[in-house]
Image: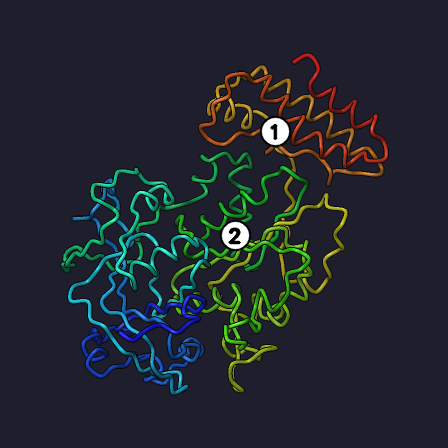
Amino acid sequence: MTSLPENAEQRPCWFVGASYGGTEDQTDRFLREGIWENGWGMNGDDRLFNKVNSMRPGDRIAIKSAYIRKNGLPFDNGGKYVSTMAIKARGIITENPGDGCLVHVNWTPLGSKREWYFYTNRNTIWDVLPGQGTIPWAANGLIDFAFADKGQDYDRFLRQWGWVSADQTDSSMPVDLEVTEEEIVSDPEYLAAEPYSIDSILSEGCFLERSRLEDILEHWRMKKNLILQGPPGTGKTWLARKLAYALMGRKDDRQMQAVQFHPNLSYEDFVRGWRPAGEGRLELRDGPFLNVVDAARDDPNSVYVVVIEEINRGNPAQIFGEMLTLLEADKRREEEGLGLSYRKSDNERVFVPPNLYVIGTMNTADRSLALVDLAFRRRFAFEELEPVFGAKWRDWVSLNCGIEVAFLERIERRLLDLNRQITDDKSLGRQFCIGHSFVTPPIGFSIPNASDWFDRVVKREIGPLLDECWYDSPDTAQKAKDDLRSGL
């Protein structure tokens, strides 16, 4: 294996498949001929042309095969299926002719397959950037595993995926396992990620009615793009992720990309732009949105979701650019594709596939934000969230945190009185109400002294918001805080 170029640590590592559309495994031929070949492209399908043309001499590349396993694993999987990826060979790209079909590679055979678990990808091409992605430490771990013979830290992955942390081996050592056909399950319905539904959302502390959740999901499926808006503390970000899991049908972060919008975010950051590539050069690199577009297009039988937090803190029309047109539900077809502001080839046209969904959150109490323009609003459905109290909230908090229902009833009455005061104030309105999330502790969070807990919530979370609401009337804010805490 040739030595790495100086900027290798800043470049993607490519994990590629060796069979396409039911063809036989081409690994042996690739190693023998010193190539990797885009089988789709050789058949006239251009779906991966842009990815292949992004590969550069000096980039690291590995042949992988993704599937799931249940038996003979080097840790306690509790009888669950585990998403698995076998690394079969690795090398360094030596030449890219630029035809979108083939690259030349100096391969190093591994002898036997080495299996990597949890953080995997079934797409034909998976570009993994060091220190980036939805789980940066997992990306770094995979790169070290594939190219530096390091082991996988099973305990850390078991904790990240919420599984029992019971590593049965020395995780500092790489594990080589031969894969037998009877252990491989290729049906996507058996993926390791746990199933997820509306029942899951309700069991985890959502106080909306089932019928409303069903209606939200149904409208999102039709419109493709949804925004949850409402006052602070109404659970917008929490619910956005849970709805994404329910739409996907399973709790799998590999098919979900979360992004935070802010005033400095640009089209070049989100869609595509020029990036430093070392040695004073720039390269055209796709942003997180186009990466998800590519993944969804290459995996049409799965649902992919982009979650955008605080979508109105940036300038959505500017950040999305021509993507704003392509987001429309009736333009989710290849023939509706458009050329981008920055093109990788003269004839490149991009479209947003129908299996990609977008959900954003919007805080209606943020006075610093301008109104979102009408062109943007027309492409999204909007769902208004409000503070939700009542019996469902009281029973859930009492059961999970050990707080007496009578105490929760007193808190509820005071917060409802406060929200009425805020709503009736002509300088504020219902968009400044205090949401239930402030007084809904996480699952399993034990609260030995309810009065002390609520006092801290008022002092450190609700109080600063009230100071901001009545910044021109500090006495009003102070009285509201005193009314919440007195006598508890």
Can residue 234 be seen from the camera position used here?
Answer: yes
Residue marked by disc 1: 389
Residue matched to label 2: 218
Residue type of the residue flagged with mark 2: Glu
Mark 2: which secondary structure?
helix
Q: Secondary structure at mark 1?
A: loop
Quadrant assignment, res 469: top right
Residue under the point 50% across and 17% down:
448
Q: Nearer the viewer, residue 193 or 159?
A: 159
Instruction: Say if residue 283 shows up in the picture.
Output: no
Q: Residues within 10 Å of mark 1 (few under 14, many from 20)?
A: many
Residue at horizontal 73%, vertical 46%? 366
Among numbered discs 1 and 2, the one appearing first in the sequence: 2
Q: Nearer the viewer, residue 202 or 482?
A: 482
Q: Quadrant of residue 187?
A: bottom left
- Residue under the point 42% across and 75% down: 51
Residue 331 position in % (x across, y down) = 56, 71
